[in-house]
Image (cartoon, grey):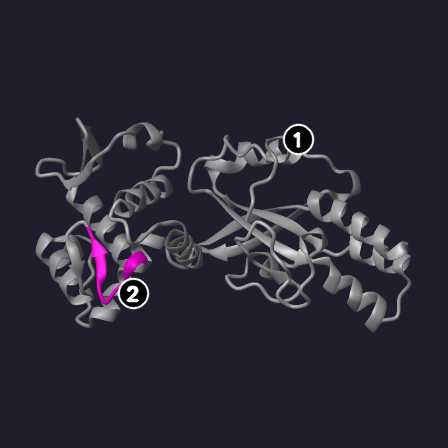
Amino acid sequence: MPPAKKSRELDLSAFPPGTVTEYSTLLCLACIFDLFTSQLGLAPRTAYSEIKRYAPSIEELTAPTAVRPFFDSEEKHPHCPYCNAAKRWHSRLDTFRIEGVKSTDTARRALAKSLPTKDNQFQFIETRSDRRSLFFDWLDTQRGNLDLENESWLIDATRSFLERLEPKHNWSEVFADLRSVRRSQRLEVGWERAGSRLFLAPSLYNEVLVVQYLISRSHTHAGHTFEGRITLAELIRRLRYSGYLGANEIDESDQFGILERLVEKLSGGSARTKLYYVVDRRNFLEKVKSVYSRYAT
């Protein structure tokens, strides 16, 4: 998806990394206008008024696989896969999901105050979810954003996980020119950087391994981690030997039961949290007007 012009981009720099998830999809206005004018028999002006008020659901805007009249394409000049309409008939809808945690409250309120309210250029939606669902959404985002064929993704995934764990910390500085991440033999908690290496306390390092396994296990026959390619049984064996399972009172005997407990620990489980969605409708409104002018003439 081509990026928006710099002057139109939302400034999200005040939000801690890992607290904002961006979604982008294309909407075929030719399909929509055809539905309103040809199938429902509305006049172009009436169709235009109805379509301007159209507010897609969060499910439509963030679905992993777009459904008509939405579609995704990486092409510079895409055509609608349903009606073959050219690029001039498409609008782009960008959606930003902000996690409702303390570290985002001030920035979120400031963003809401700074955005124009005229013509509903931005749509604000508040929902609730649980930490477990958010964690799996985050894992899916990592799979989509990381190049799992390049081993450098292991360090990138570690950074993303730490950004979620400690969102207020400047991880860009910590990971600048970093060459390796290792298990510390002397730290009991936290982390430290020495030269081009980052050392993690054993418990934190183990959690990184679990995250790496979860991100990559559907991509390969086994999960890919700092410790190489390992199966779930091998991962659990390492966690048990290192004392991580015992320290966290994970005593299930079944490996999938243990995995469930690990996910519960890393995600926060069923704890509820607020989510705030900001839908950028500016391109949509501009394109609807442009398409209407074609129908009207």
Around disc 2, counting alpha carbons within 10 Å, would you say few (fewer than 14), some (14 to 19), or many (20 or more)?
Answer: some
- Figure check: 230 above or below 93: below
The residue shown at (36%, 39%) is: 163
Around disc 1, counting alpha carbons within 10 Å, would you say few (fewer than 14), some (14 to 19), or many (20 or more)?
Answer: few
- Figure check: 46 above or below 226: below
User: At label 2, which amino acid type do we have?
Assistant: Glu
Magenta segment includes 63: no
Of residue 69 and residue 81, the one placed in the foreground of this image is 81
The residue shown at (84%, 70%) is: 38
* Picture quarter with the C terminus: bottom right
User: At label 1, which amino acid type do we have?
Assistant: Ser
Of residue 49 and residue 116, the one placed in the foreground of this image is 49
Q: Position of residue 257 (x, y in %)?
A: 25, 69
- Residue that mark 1 sits on: 114
Q: Position of residue 196 (x, y in %)?
A: 19, 30
Of residue 131 and residue 182, the one placed in the foreground of this image is 182
Q: Which mark is residue 225?
A: none
- Residue that mark 2 sits on: 260
Image-based side of 7 in relation to 46, left or right:
left
* For discs 2 and 1, the disc positioned in front in the rendered view: 1
> What span is in magenta?
215-225
Q: Quadrant of residue 198?
A: top left
Q: Position of residue 100 (x, y in %)?
A: 51, 44
The residue shown at (63%, 50%) is: 93
Image-based side of 135 in relation to 40, left or right:
left
SS at mark 1 in the image? helix
SS at mark 2 in the image? helix
- For the residues labelled 2 and 1, the Cα–Cα distance comes to 42 Å
Image-based side of 264 in relation to 94, left or right:
left
Magenta segment includes 222: yes
The residue shown at (22%, 36%) is: 190
Q: Position of residue 36 (x, y in %)?
A: 82, 66
